[in-house]
């Protein structure tokens, strides 16, 4: 018999958005709830994110007066996903998003969420909207968290380079801070860090607890009502990546360092079915001077070529689509070719009007050449092909029309005119400069030597495949029956969106929505 302090109603594995919000929702219903977190900090990959939540029809969108009904969103999902087996998950997600925001906004610790105009990623699809369907948490003063701030994972810029976020938390850290504060305020919830899931415990066909390693000691934790697996994906596990997503090994991932697939393995070990293990939320990753990669979007100048010296994608398209195309073409690495005009306008890795940090050149992350021929040799691509690519691209720049890849034509593309995704700084950290009057602001000509080249690789913000779930977030066996007492959300579960990325906030939105659905099922509400 487990000790009383090791028995809970609900145990949540993982402390990202879905884990912590789900834990709050359980605890606020009077369920004694424990969150176990493998690392020493809470927040997971959510802490790195902008915390967008793709929740069509939710209250913040309605308050903003934006037409974004659930019916149109359902039409959109049906069209772009095209997988009837996922339709019940889509319907559950759409319903949960509206109800979840209503419930969270009743809690002062969360406050009101706000609408942000980020266009849907598949422009022109039935039901798509240029206004978008994304909502965000409001910023949170660090002072409001008190000593709890020491538990929060820093954002990716702080973790890697010590860039200070200042006295106010934004994006993912704001969401995690609000969720942690709300969870602890319930008085029925607690968090245990440095506690890794090792196995799930099953009795009479039901998951009744888990075995963990907590601060180096093995122990057992019992769950009377249910276990929710919300521990992220397996993006940081070289073995699983090599098995399911070759040639990737995880070194280019922008996922949290603790995401090594522990929850996935534990589910598989007790007979859980899996789906889409070859998938990830792929993004272009710009190789940094320290060898890491940073999720990058907002390319406003230059172009990308493969090993043949040819363009192959709209470099400004939604990041998941670009990342998938890099993987499909096996354009590894991809070369970002730019010129002095681009550096003068947007700089590279630092504030505008300041010289490029010499570490970019010293490390080889950014290479410089006086001529295109020299640049072709630097990246080992055929000069004739690269020269033709430049000539064709400059023709498009002159006319303003990218006849091959249509860069600068969609609402998402047009948004990039106003965002500078600096390679080592958060987007919009500095104001962008004007476009100097060429016909298409996203197609400036490449005609001002010297020339430069940076390296793009297929990175991700987490793997996408995982345990198969139903519309209640219950984990399913291969025969389609649910494993009693076991639930999954976020990147531990295979997504409702299948192989596509509908709009900003789908990953975290899914994590929160299915964490909510799990709690509703556990609580019987």
Image (spheres, rainbow, N blue to C red):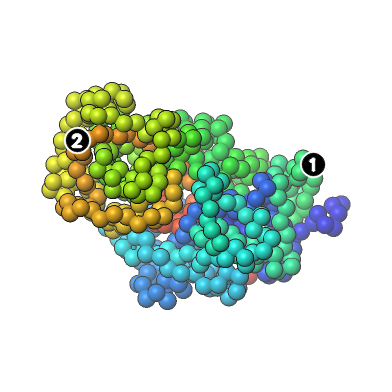
Using the rendered view, name the quadrant where residue 62 is placed.
bottom left
Which numbered dot is residue 390? 2
Count every numbered label the image shows and give the total: 2
Which residue is located at x 19 percent, y 30 percent? 387
Which residue is located at x 79 percent, y 41 percent? 217
Viewed as shown, does residue 251 lie left or right of 31? left
Q: Is any part of residue 499 visible from this angle?
A: no
Considering only order in the chain, which callout, 2 or 1, is on the residue closer to the N terminus?
1
Rendered position, 479 above or below 520? above
Furthest residue in direction front, as rendered: 354
Rendered position, 383 above or below 87? above
- CA separation in Å, label 1 and label 2: 60 Å
Percent from the top left, x then y, of residue 197?
Answer: 69, 44
Q: Nearer the viewer, residue 302 or 490?
A: 302
Rendered position, 500 above or below 146? above
Q: Is any part of residue 344 visible from this angle?
A: yes
Using the rendered view, name the quadrant where residue 457 is placed.
top left
Q: Nearer the viewer, residue 142 or 387?
A: 142
Which residue is located at x 57 percent, y 36 percent? 237
Label 1, residues with CA under 10 Å away: few <14, some 14-19, many ≥20: few
Which residue is located at x 26 percent, y 40 percent? 340
Which secondary structure lies at badge 2?
helix
Which secondary structure lies at badge 1?
strand
The quadrant of the image that shows the C terminus is bottom right
Percent from the top left, x then y, of residue 109?
Answer: 61, 70
- Which is closer to the viewer, label 1 or label 2? 2
Percent from the top left, x then y, of residue 4?
Answer: 85, 58
Q: Which residue is mark 1?
A: 217
Label 2, residues with CA under 10 Å away: few <14, some 14-19, many ≥20: many
Which numbered dot is residue 287? none
Percent from the top left, x then y, of residue 321?
Answer: 36, 46
Viewed as shown, does residue 17 lie left or right of 55? right
């Amino acid at each position: 018999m487990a000790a009383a302090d090791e028995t809970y109603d609900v145990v949540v594995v993982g402390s990202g958005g879905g884990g912590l919000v789900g834990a709050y929702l359980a605890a606020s219903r009077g369920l004694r709830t424990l969150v176990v977190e493998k690392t020493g900090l809470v927040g997971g990959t959510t802490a790195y994110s902008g915390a967008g939540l793709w929740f069509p029809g939710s209250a913040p969108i309605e308050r903003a007066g934006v037409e974004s009904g659930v019916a149109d969103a359902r039409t959109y999902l049906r069209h772009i996903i095209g997988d009837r087996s996922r339709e019940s998950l889509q319907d559950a997600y759409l319903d949960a998003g509206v109800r979840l925001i209503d419930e969270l906004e009743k809690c002062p610790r969360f406050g009101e969420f706000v609408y942000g105009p980020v266009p849907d990623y598949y422009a022109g699809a039935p039901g798509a909207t240029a206004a978008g369907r994304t909502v965000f948490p409001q910023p949170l003063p660090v002072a409001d968290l008190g000593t709890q701030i020491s538990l929060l994972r820093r954002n990716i810029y702080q973790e890697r380079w010590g860039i200070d976020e200042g006295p106010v938390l934004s994006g993912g850290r704001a969401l995690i801070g609000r969720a942690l504060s709300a969870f602890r305020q319930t008085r029925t919830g607690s968090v245990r860090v440095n506690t890794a899931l090792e196995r799930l415990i099953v009795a009479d066909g039901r998951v009744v607890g888990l075995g963990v390693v907590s601060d180096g000691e093995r122990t057992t934790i019992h769950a009377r009502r249910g276990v929710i697996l919300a521990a992220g994906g397996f993006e940081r596990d070289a073995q699983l990546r090599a098995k399911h997503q070759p040639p990737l090994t995880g070194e280019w991932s922008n996922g949290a360092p603790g995401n090594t697939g522990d929850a996935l393995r534990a589910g598989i070990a007790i007979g859980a079915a899996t789906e889409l293990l070859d998938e990830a939320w792929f993004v272009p990753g710009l190789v940094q001077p320290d060898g890491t990669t940073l999720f990058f979007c907002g390319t406003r100048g230059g172009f990308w070529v493969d090993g043949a010296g040819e363009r192959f994608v709209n470099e400004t398209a939604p990041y998941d689509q670009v990342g998938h195309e890099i993987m499909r073409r096996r354009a590894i690495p991809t070369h970002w070719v730019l010129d002095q005009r681009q550096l003068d306008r947007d700089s590279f890795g630092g504030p505008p009007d300041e010289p490029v940090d010499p570490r970019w050149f010293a490390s080889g992350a950014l290479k410089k050449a006086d001529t295109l021929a020299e640049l072709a040799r630097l990246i080992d691509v055929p000069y004739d092909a690269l020269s033709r690519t430049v000539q064709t691209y400059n023709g498009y720049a002159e006319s303003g029309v990218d006849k091959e890849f249509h860069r600068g034509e969609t609402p998402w593309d047009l948004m990039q005119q106003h965002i500078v995704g600096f390679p080592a700084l958060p987007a919009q950290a500095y104001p962008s400069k004007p476009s100097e009057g060429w016909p298409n602001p996203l197609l400036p000509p490449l005609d001002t030597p010297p020339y430069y080249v940076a390296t793009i690789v297929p990175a991700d913000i987490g793997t996408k495949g995982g345990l198969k779930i139903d519309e209640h977030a219950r984990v399913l066996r291969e025969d389609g029956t649910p494993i009693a007492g076991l639930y999954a959300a976020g990147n531990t579960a295979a997504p409702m969106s299948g192989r596509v990325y509908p709009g900003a906030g789908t990953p975290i939105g899914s994590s929160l929505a299915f964490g909510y659905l799990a709690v509703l099922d556990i609580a019987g509400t």
